[in-house]
Image: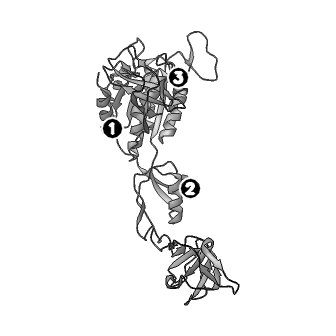
């Protein structure tokens, strides 16, 4: 049995990166950028007004000014602004040649003769200078970035309509056990609905991968072998839930070895998730996760999700908050790293959820995150600051 820290390092060292593909930029949100994107224009592309106001020469700012034209956004100035003249200008419109200041309409005084004058006390330039944000040829988005909605806007602004992104890792999901039935069926004695597959499918999608479900493998070694072989040759990552513990029908590790998988660890000093198994094949990376849904959920978040992102050239950093505990908390055993689901109340305090074990899947629906208790630490006191990893 190895520590979780050791397990994480082993998993990360096994990363191989996916290939790339070119897609429309409108479909790129949530993908990982596989190229540097350069600007083909200056931004702003011309010096423009930052306010609705009057453009003039700063030397004339205290004089009465003749308004010679009105410049709207999208129109070129038609008049040259001379001494003691100005142009009324709208936000985003082109600054007339020679003008070096725009004062706001709210800071203007109108005279009966039609002239105006600056009436403010704190003169600001109110001009966005050509190229002050970005110059032609500048890198506007870096390779390895998780593309977000604002990045799609950046691509649109520089005319980058086809974007090179990392391919999504294909993740095969296999559930094991004769006791499992489909969610649409009603369980009889000894049966349970298969929740792991659908939970993992959603987790894979959220992590940026593409999930393929291979159904339920019965407690039959040869059939399980055939399903695992098929998944290994079709996927980048294979996740098997169940069959990795110490029961008579927990033969998944043996089947993995038979399939050509090199097992790198099969026990982790963590709770929940001790029987987590990890191995590598020339075709795929393989995880054997515990059958209990809380264990599989947490170990996916801790080990598989970072791997999926690394395979796309992206280092995912989970969001964490440092918050105080609302109550005293004590766990039954302290020999392993404890990963405790918690709820954050309205006072931004942390409360461990009522958690009856790794099969208690509904506990996760009440959870906002996970806190870790190091081996040897059995209790936490009210008010103690803990690190909450969001889930």
Secondary element at tag 1: helix
- Taking the image as shown, residue 12 lies to the left or right of residue 127, namely left
The image shows residue 252 at horizontal and vertical percentages of 40, 21
Q: Which residue is mark 1?
A: 12
- The answer to whether residue 328 is above or below residue 89 is above
Which of 355 and 225 lies nearest the eye of the viewer? Answer: 355
Answer yes or no: do the residues labelled 1 and 2 have beta carbons within 8 Å? no
Q: Observer-nearest residue: 233 or 9?
A: 9
Q: Secondary structure at mark 3?
A: helix
Disc 3 packing (10 Å; few <14; some 14–19; many ≥20): some
- Look at discs 2 and 3 and give the one toward the viewer: 3
Q: Dot 1 surroundings within 10 Å: few (below 14), some, or many (20 or more)?
A: some
Whether residue 280 is visible, yes or no, is yes
Query: Residue 298, which numbered label?
Result: none
Q: Earlier in the sequence, mark 1 or mark 2?
A: 1
Q: Nearer the viewer, residue 115 or 125?
A: 115
Secondary structure at badge 2 equals helix
Q: Are marks 2 and 3 in contact (CB under 8 Å)?
A: no
Drawn side of residue 282 relative to residue 229, left or right: left
The outermost residue toward the right is 112
Q: Is the residue 235 above or below the residue 226 in the image?
A: below
Q: Within the image, what quadrant is residue 319 found in?
A: top left
User: In front: mark 3 or mark 1?
Assistant: 3
Residue 26: which numbered mark, if any?
2
Q: Which one is earlier in the sequence, the residue at label 2 or at label 3? A: 2
Q: Is residue 92 above or below residue 70?
A: above
Distance, label 1 to label 2, CA atoms, is: 31 Å
User: Label 3, on which residue?
Assistant: 363
- Label 3 to label 1, Cα distance in Å? 29 Å
Disc 2 and disc 3: Cα gap in Å?
Answer: 37 Å
């Amino acid at each position: 049995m190895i520590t979780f820290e050791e397990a994480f390092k082993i998993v990360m060292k096994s990363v191989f990166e996916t290939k790339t593909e070119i897609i429309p930029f409108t479909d790129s949100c949530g993908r990982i950028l596989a190229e540097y994107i350069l600007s083909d224009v200056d931004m702003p592309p011309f010096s423009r007004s930052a306010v609705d106001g009057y453009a003039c020469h700063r030397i004339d700012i205290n004089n009465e000014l003749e308004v010679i034209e009105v410049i709207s956004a999208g129109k070129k100035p038609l008049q040259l602004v001379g001494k003691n003249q100005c142009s009324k200008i709208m936000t985003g419109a082109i600054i007339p040649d020679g003008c070096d200041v725009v004062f706001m309409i709210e800071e203007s005084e109108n005279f009966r003769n039609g002239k105006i004058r600056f009436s403010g006390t704190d003169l600001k330039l109110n001009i966005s200078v050509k190229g002050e944000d970005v110059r032609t040829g500048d890198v506007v988005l870096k390779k390895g970035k998780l593309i977000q909605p604002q990045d799609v806007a950046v691509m649109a602004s520089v005319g980058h309509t086809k974007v090179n992104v990392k391919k999504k890792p294909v993740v095969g999901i296999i559930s094991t056990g004769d006791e499992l039935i489909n969610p649409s069926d009603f369980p009889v004695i000894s049966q349970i609905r298969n929740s792991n597959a659908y939970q993992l499918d959603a987790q894979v999608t959220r992590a940026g991968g593409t999930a393929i479900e291979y159904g339920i493998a019965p407690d039959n070694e040869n059939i399980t072998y055939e399903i695992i072989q098929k998944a290994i040759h079709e996927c980048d990552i294979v996740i098997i839930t169940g069959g990795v513990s110490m029961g008579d029908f927990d033969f998944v590790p043996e089947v993995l070895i038979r399939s050509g998988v090199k097992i790198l660890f099969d026990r982790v000093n963590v709770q929940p998730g001790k029987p987590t198994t990890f191995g590598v094949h020339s075709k795929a990376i393989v995880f054997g996760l515990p059958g209990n849904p809380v264990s599989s959920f947490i170990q996916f978040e801790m080990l598989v999700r970072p791997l999926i992102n690394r395979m796309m050239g992206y280092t995912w950093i989970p969001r964490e908050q440092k918050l105080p505990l609302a109550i005293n908390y004590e766990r039954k055993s302290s020999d392993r790293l404890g990963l405790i689901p918690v709820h954050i109340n309205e006072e931004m305090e942390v409360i461990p959820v009522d958690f009856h074990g790794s099969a208690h899947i509904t506990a996760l629906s009440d959870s906002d995150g996970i806190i870790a208790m190091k081996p040897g630490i059995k209790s936490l006191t009210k008010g103690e600051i803990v690190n909450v990893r969001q889930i």
